[in-house]
Structure formats: C-alpha cells, structure tokens
C-alpha cells in the first residue's frame, strides 16, 4: 500500500517531539561592520585615476592625489567602523586612540575638493574666483555628508570608572595576542575545506571571546585566566594548523573526530572558567554587601 510521505519540513508535517534542536552553523555569526556602503567608496577613485591620465602633467597630478585621498578615506572609514563595532560590543572600552571616521570625513572632503578643482582647472573658461570657491564648497559638502552618513567615532571611554588603567592595559595586550591566535586559527581551518568544521571552530571562538569579555570587565581575573588566553589558545592554534594540513590531503575521518573532540574539551574548559569567574565576582559582591550592612548597623542604621 502506498504511504504518504511526510515530515516536519513537509506541508502539514509535524516535528518529531523527541528530536532536540541543534545549534545551527550560522548561530553567533558576526556581521562585518564595514559593509557594502563603506566598501563602495573604493570605487570612485578608480575612474578618477583613468580620467586623469590624459590631462597633462598638472591635471594628472591633481587627479592622482585626489584619488589617493579618497582611497585613504575609504580605508580609514572601514577600520573606524570595525573599531566602533568592537567598542559597542564591550561593556568596558576605551575610545579609539585615532578618530578614524573623522579623519576619513576630512580626507573625503579634501579628495572631493581636489577632484573638483581638477575640473575647474581644465575648464579654461572658468573664472579664477569660481575655480577656488566651488571646490571648497564641494569638499565641505562631501565631508559633511560623509559625517552624517557614517557618524563620528566614540569620543569617550565606556565603563572605565574605578578600573585600574595599568591593569586594563595589561589585559588589552594579552587579549590582543589572544585575538591574533583566533585569527590564525580561522585562516588555518579554511585550508581544510570543510564548512562544518569551520562553523565548529567559530563556535569555540565565540566561547573564548566570552572569557575575553569577562576578563576585560574585571582585570583582576587576568592571573587566573592567563593560561587560557595564552597556553591553551596557542595549543589550539597549533593543533588547528596540523589538522588542516593533514585533513586537506587525506580527508581522514579519524583526524576530524579527534580534532572535534579537542574543540569540545576546550570549549567546555573555557565555559567553565568563565562561569567560575562570574561566581567569584558574585561572591565578592556578597561579601562587600555584608560588610557594608554590618558597618551601617554599627552606625545605627538598620536595613530591612
């Protein structure tokens, strides 16, 4: 007898109640802060370069300088957006040392003004005053529109009150090295050519970054977490490099299983360390509250 095919993905299908939801490979995916609207600013300098090649020595020089300024502005904008995204994801963060987005707006204005002046310079019928005023107005308008479109850089520190800046600098250096290890892991695992194991590495990196944020919020935890941020991540990076080289050549299922087990162990250890730090912080807060309560009671203040 024919049997109607059905399932949870079929029309009027029902999901299996015993099936547990699994974490998808796209969970926790980080969106690139410098999206298409920032990357598209790399396009205008290209035609400007080609249009300037036949404009004589002075016209070509002005056009190439304008293209270089616009390209530099696009680079600064991209880095500024990434720095701002990193600033926003952290509870405690310092303002960017270099206001890249502001500099990008300035360079955009200068590049636009030079590109406009090139046109005025080539137009022999343009008046001398108009040849200066018009590029300045175009540059000011471009800089203003750039600032309105992309905003300004964060101009003040966030959540830094009462934090030892020396300890915070130590933490920043250690976490910068740890992020370098994660970036090297990402580059190495791409050689394996397996999207599932790449997603598995990304999930471990998300767990590791939770530990990073916990240490950033309380630099006193650096001593206990240092081996996780240095030794363990270095070992994970080295293991990833070796696995990728072997798996890319042999597609060995046993190597894949062993590497997956290593990631599971590392993820569990990092998550356990993060939980321990949070519990210790909560215990310290409880002790401080109890001490403050006893002090107020000795002063004759009763808390109900």
Image (cartoon, rainbow, N blue to C red):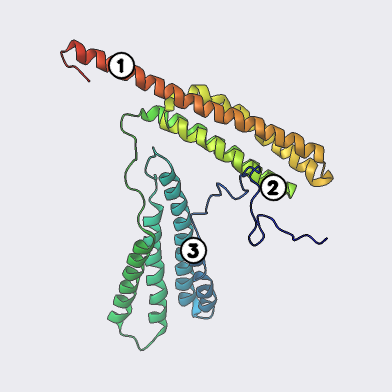
Give percent across and percent down for residue 220: 43, 24
Please rate how many residues cluster around mark 1, counting C-alpha atoms within 10 Å: few if below 14, some from 14 to 19, many from 20: few
Please rate how many residues cluster around mark 2, counting C-alpha atoms within 10 Å: few if below 14, some from 14 to 19, many from 20: few
Q: Assess whether mark 1 and mark 2 are in contact (beta carbons under 8 angstroms).
A: no
The secondary structure type at the circle numbered 2 is helix
Instruction: Tell me, yes or no, if residue 229 can be seen here.
Output: no
Give percent across and percent down for residue 228: 57, 28
Q: Which residue is mark 1?
A: 290
Give percent across and percent down for residue 192: 74, 46
Q: Quadrant of residue 252?
A: top right
Q: Which residue, as the protein is rendered here, is positioned at the far front? A: 1
Which numbered mark, 1 or 3, is in the foreground of this view? 1
Q: Which residue, as the protein is rendered here, is positioned at the far top? A: 298
The C terminus - image quarter: top left
The residue at the point 43 percent across, 27 percent down is: 219
Q: Quadrant of residue 180?
A: top right
Report how far apart the C-alphas of labels 3 and 2 lie in the structure: 36 Å
Tag shown at residue 196: 2
* Near-viewer residue (126 or 30): 30
Which numbered mark, 2 or 1, is in the foreground of this view? 1
Q: Which residue is mark 3?
A: 71
């Amino acid at each position: 007898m024919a049997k109607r095919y059905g399932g949870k993905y079929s029309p009027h299908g029902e999901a299996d109640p015993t099936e547990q939801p699994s974490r998808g490979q796209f969970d926790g995916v980080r969106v690139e802060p410098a999206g298409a609207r920032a990357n598209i600013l790399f396009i205008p300098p290209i035609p400007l370069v080609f249009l300037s090649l036949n404009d004589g020595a002075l016209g070509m020089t002005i056009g190439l300088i304008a293209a270089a300024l616009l390209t530099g502005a696009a680079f600064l904008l991209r880095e500024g957006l990434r720095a701002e995204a990193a600033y926003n994801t952290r509870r405690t963060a310092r303002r960017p040392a270099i206001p890249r987005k502001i500099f990008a707006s300035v360079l955009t204005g200068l590049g636009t003004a030079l590109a406009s002046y090139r046109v005025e310079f080539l137009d022999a019928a343009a008046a001398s005053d108009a040849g200066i005023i018009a590029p300045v107005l175009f540059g000011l308008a471009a800089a203003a529109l750039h600032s309105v479109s992309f905003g300004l850089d964060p101009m003040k520190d966030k959540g830094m009150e009462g934090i030892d800046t020396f300890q915070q600098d130590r933490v920043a250096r250690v976490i910068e090295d740890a992020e370098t290890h994660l970036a090297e892991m990402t580059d190495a695992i791409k050689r394996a050519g397996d999207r599932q194991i790449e997603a598995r590495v990304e999930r471990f990196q998300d767990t590791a970054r939770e530990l990073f944020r916990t240490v950033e919020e309380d630099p006193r935890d650096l001593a206990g977490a240092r081996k996780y941020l240095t030794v363990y991540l270095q070992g994970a990076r080295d293991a990833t490099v070796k696995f990728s080289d072997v798996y890319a050549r042999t597609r060995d299922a046993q190597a894949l299983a062993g590497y997956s087990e290593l990631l599971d162990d590392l993820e569990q250890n990092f998550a356990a360390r993060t939980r321990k730090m949070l519990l210790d912080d909560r215990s310290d807060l409880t002790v401080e509250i109890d001490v403050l309560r006893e002090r107020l009671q000795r002063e004759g203040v009763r808390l109900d």
